[in-house]
Amino acid sequence: MELHRIDLDRPGHLLDGYYAAYVAGDDERPEPPRSRPRFAWMITRGWAGYPHEAWAAVADGEVVGGYALEFPEDENPHLAELLALTVHPAHRRRGVGRALIAHVHERARANGRGAVLTWARAEGATAGFAKALGFDQTYASVRRLLDLRTAGWDRYRELAAVRVPGYELEYWDGPARGARLDDLTALMQGMNDAPQAEGVDKPDWGRERVAFAEEALGPCRQRSLVVVARRLADGVPAGFTRIYVDEDGEPAWGLQADTTVLREHRGRRLGVLLKAANLVRLRRDAPSVERLVTWNAASNAPMVAVNDELGYRPLDAWGQWTAQSAT
């Protein structure tokens, strides 16, 4: 087996083989894999514009696996983030995974990073593999699933019709630009109030970073349905939520992504209102979506309570895993 670095500007057949291995390789996945545009953007550019590199494992001329690394700059400069480590099922138990992890640590050290961080399931074969290779779980997260085929739509419409005194809702569809980008940058600061893994810096949600992520929607072929709550007195944004729908992926699945209400506006049930309003809008504007997946820190009790009220149920347990790369 040989490892070939993928040219991120002209990834060609190496990316094709890597993606094919990724699609085939996660037999623990209950939902469809990421669409190819999303996968390609994740391993070549990411959501913050930080440096990336990607590698394909090749045996007898066939790509049998791969991985990508992201090197944060504004925060966590001591870490390399491991993305999409994959071994095709037909080539497992031949040492490919261990060889890839050894190479991950080599590349992390070469880039001045003393540790590797990744997201992986907290149970099952993936967790066992991580533990065997020296990774420790440092943060617990639970994915939740909302089945829209059996959802309580009357209840959602009722919740969405509630008017919180002093606030109004505004709906976006697509990337935020101009004044909306300023608003979104301010709102993203609220995401840092969620629990964070020990030893991991919180993201720096500057305008440039938020703009980069918004413009990634196009090449990722993702639709972003956003609802913002504004204070009527001065128009300042108080909270928001968004749902992503892959335009090149499985149309029956969507992602309930960021939701936050800034501190001074909390205690008014704006979070429930925002999410319920966006569900009603989703059914109208993207009726093919039948299931929504969302992530919550296991310790984020307020957001877990909101999702429980809306009918989300636990799907599987995940965690951040960290291993030292220093010699």
Image (cartoon, grey):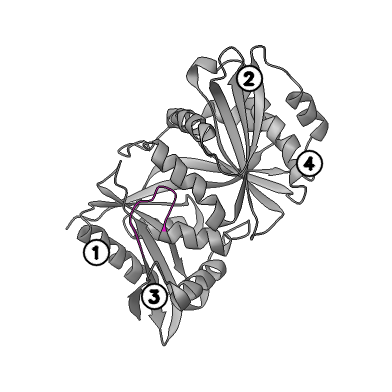
Pair 4/1: label in front: 4
Mark 4 belongs to which amino acid? Answer: Arg
Q: What is the x, y in percent for residue 183?
A: 51, 29
Which quarter of the figure is the C terminus placed in? Answer: bottom left
**Mark 2 highlights which residue?**
269
Quote the CA–CA distance across marks 4 and 1.
Answer: 50 Å
In contact (CB < 8 Å): disc 4 and disc 1 = no
> Which span is picked out in magenta?
45-53
Q: Residue at x 47, y 78 (%)?
A: 13
In contact (CB < 8 Å): disc 3 and disc 1 = no
**Magenta stretch contains residue 46:** yes
Whichever of labels 3 and 2 marks the residue nearer the N terminus, that label is 3
Q: What is the x, y in percent for residue 36?
A: 56, 64
As helix, strand or loop, the secondary structure at mark 4 comes to helix
Which quarter of the figure is the N terminus placed in? Answer: bottom left
Pair 4/2: label in front: 4
**Mark 1 highlights which residue?**
106
**Mark 4 highlights which residue?**
284
